[in-house]
Image (cartoon, helix red, strand yellow):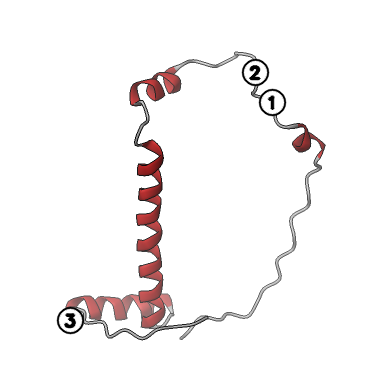
Amino acid sequence: MRTSNFALRLQSTLMEEAKAMAKDEGVALNQLINVAVAEKLAATRTLQFFERYTRDANVEDALALLRRPRIGEPPREGDELPATWKRRKAQPARSQKKRPSTRNK
């Protein structure tokens, strides 16, 4: 993984809280800041995704669809799973071996 250096100037109160949180989490301050930036980017990208794909949505039609009662109603044409899914057998979960921690401390 390639890294870049960046001089970050934080308010002293933010820095102290960040250091305390990093210590509580058992990670380096650098790691905490990396995770915080990644979380913010993910949240922003998610919001942009939903804004892009709901821009032309008709809210009234969507709400009417959600309010429509379907209890006890038989499946409709198109509700079935693709044939390729029906042939699949449930695969047993892979055993997950414990790996040594790679966290910065």
Q: Position of residue 61 (x, y in %)?
A: 39, 20
Q: Are marks 2 and 1 in contact (CB under 8 Å)?
A: yes
Q: Tag 1: residue type?
A: Glu
SS under mark 2: loop
Quarter occupied by residue 90: top right
- Is 78 on the left or on the right of 67, as rendered? right
- Is 80 on the left or on the right of 23, as rendered? right
Looking at marks 3 and 1 on the same chain, the residue that comes earlier in the sequence is marked by 3
Relative to 72, say whether 95 is above or below. Answer: below
Q: Tag 3: residue type?
A: Ser
- Is 101 on the left or on the right of 32, as rendered? right
Mark 2: give few (<14), some (14-19) or many (20+) Cα within 10 Å. Answer: few
Depth order, front residue of 57/70 = 57
Q: Which residue is mark 2?
A: 75
SS under mark 1: loop
Q: Residue at x 38, y 23 (%)?
A: 63
Q: Which residue is mark 3?
A: 12
Mark 1: give few (<14), some (14-19) or many (20+) Cα within 10 Å. Answer: few
Q: Residue at x 17, y 81 (%)?
A: 12
Q: Nearer the viewer, mark 3 or mark 2?
A: 2
Q: Which mark is residue 80?
A: 1
Quarter occupied by residue 17: bottom left
SS under mark 3: helix
Q: Position of residue 67 (x, y in %)?
A: 42, 19
